């Protein structure tokens, strides 16, 4: 099968595109091909697309009783984005979720209600793609105004999206017929359990960076369809008996992949364990305002000591003081905190390992 051809319906669920909010250029959203089977699904090359995430500038606005239609321009094209005033999409998408999932949905709805979008504003929206009068539109599940005075969000988006195209969007799905053609094993070889954990860790980094989630547990993550679809991808190799046993059960595989991916984030300092009982709860490091505040106060106090007057407070001294309050914070996590404080101009590094607070 050619990469541009539509795969059979039984293979749609093997492709993470089927569950995720694809970050496509608006030009490509406008050119999505409807399924030949007449169902409410579209294709980017051979990838089934149902939901997208867009970031762009509002270039026109039409107010209606039940919704507002925004024209969103990302520099490649303009798409109509319908944002419902009664938040019915959010209520529907929150049904059947865990307490954590419902909390995220409620926070997102409150954010929408505070957003007032005008021409020239930057909007981020997630929603379902659909065709109306032969034109592609986005019906938003969630949307918000993005304050980006330093262009940090837009620059990050412009860096991330081309990488997604190169690494995923413009390649056939590993589980599809296109991905199974003779000699094809993917850019990194056959998909093993360890590679699946690495892939999940990458997906979690993106999810936590783009969402407003500050704390999470594994049970909450297992309600996110786009993440679960990654954990359930078919494996092509299980080198040990233990891995073969885990791979044979979807439930065991999902829990194993999420657990070890979360451990990778913890090792990298992107998250740390906030509490362990009754379930392990993780805190996104740079979103813990208490940790940021305490770290800055420690540096501020230590810089007043005579021996720190010249260069400032040493990293190891900060680490010892921080871990007295936050025992599960490792050195990698503290590096994340110090970088965040320096980015917000709350501290400055006087040398490679000394810091001064303002």
Image (tube, grey):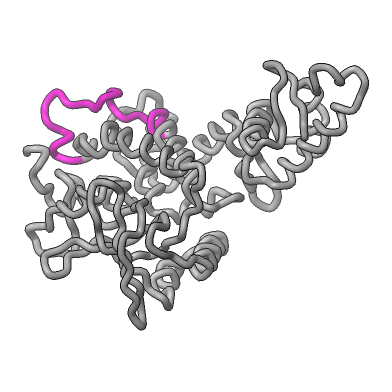
Residue 17: x %, y % from top left: 27, 48
Q: Nearer the viewer, residue 185 or 298?
A: 298
Q: Nearer the viewer, residue 344 or 275?
A: 344
Examine the image and state in which quarter residue 141 appears.
bottom left
Q: Is residue 236 above or below residue 104?
A: above
On screen, residue 107 versus residue 356, left or right, reads: left
On screen, residue 131 versus residue 211, left or right, reads: left
On screen, residue 98 versus residue 271, left or right, reads: left
Residue 80: x %, y % from top left: 26, 63
Q: Is residue 141 above or below residue 84?
A: above
Range of residues picked out in magenta: 176-196
Identity of the residue drawn at 43% across and 34% down: 197
Examine the image and state in which quarter residue 174 appears.
top left
List the single residue furthest toward the front: 120
Identity of the residue drawn at 79% across and 27% down: 318
Q: Say whether residue 333 is visible.
A: no
Q: Is residue 52 above or below residue 249?
A: below
List the single residue furthest toward the bottom: 65
Identity of the residue drawn at 66% across and 41% down: 273
Q: Say whether residue 36 is visible.
A: yes
Exactly how many numbered labels are in the figure?
A: 0
Residue 257: x %, y % from top left: 46, 39
Q: Nearer the viewer, residue 246 or 51?
A: 51
Can you say which quadrant of the picture contains the C terminus?
A: top right
Residue 216: x %, y % from top left: 58, 50
Can you say which quadrant of the picture contains the N terminus?
A: top left
Q: Is residue 191 above or below residue 257?
A: above
List the single residue furthest toward the right: 306
On screen, residue 257 versus residue 3, left or right, reads: right
Q: Is residue 207 magenta?
A: no
Identity of the residue drawn at 31% across and 73% down: 62
């Amino acid at each position: 099968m050619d990469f541009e051809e539509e795969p059979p319906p039984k293979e749609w669920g093997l492709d993470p595109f089927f569950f995720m909010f694809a970050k496509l250029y608006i030009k490509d959203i406008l050119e999505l091909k409807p399924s030949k089977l007449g169902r409410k699904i579209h294709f980017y090359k051979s990838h089934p697309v149902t939901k997208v995430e867009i970031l762009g500038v509002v270039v026109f606005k039409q107010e209606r009783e039940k919704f507002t239609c925004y024209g969103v321009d990302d520099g490649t094209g303009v798409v109509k984005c319908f944002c419902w005033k009664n938040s019915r999409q959010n209520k529907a998408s929150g049904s059947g979720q865990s307490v954590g999932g419902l909390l995220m949905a409620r926070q997102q709805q409150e954010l929408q209600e505070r957003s007032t979008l005008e021409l020239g504003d930057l909007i981020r929206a997630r929603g379902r793609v659909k065709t109306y009068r032969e034109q592609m539109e986005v019906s938003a599940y969630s949307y918000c105004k993005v304050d980006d005075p330093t262009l940090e969000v837009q620059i990050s988006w412009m860096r991330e999206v081309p990488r997604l195209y190169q690494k995923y969007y413009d390649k056939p799905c590993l589980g599809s017929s296109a991905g199974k053609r003779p000699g094809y094993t993917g850019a990194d070889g056959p998909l093993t359990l360890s590679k699946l954990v690495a892939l999940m860790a990458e997906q979690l980094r993106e999810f936590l960076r783009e969402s407003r989630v500050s704390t999470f547990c594994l049970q909450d993550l297992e309600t996110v369809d786009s993440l679960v679809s990654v954990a359930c991808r078919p494996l092509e190799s299980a080198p040990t008996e233990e891995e073969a046993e885990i791979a044979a059960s979807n439930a065991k595989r999902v829990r194993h992949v999420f657990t070890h991916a979360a451990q990778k984030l913890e090792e990298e300092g992107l998250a740390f364990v906030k509490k362990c009982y009754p379930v392990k709860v993780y805190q996104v490091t740079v979103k813990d305002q208490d940790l940021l505040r305490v770290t800055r106060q420690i540096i501020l106090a230590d810089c007043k000591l005579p021996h720190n007057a010249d260069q400032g407070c040493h990293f190891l001294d900060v680490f010892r003081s921080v871990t007295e309050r936050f025992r599960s914070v490792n050195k990698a996590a503290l590096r994340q905190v110090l970088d965040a404080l320096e980015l917000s101009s709350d501290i400055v590094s006087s040398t490679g390992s000394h810091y001064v607070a303002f």
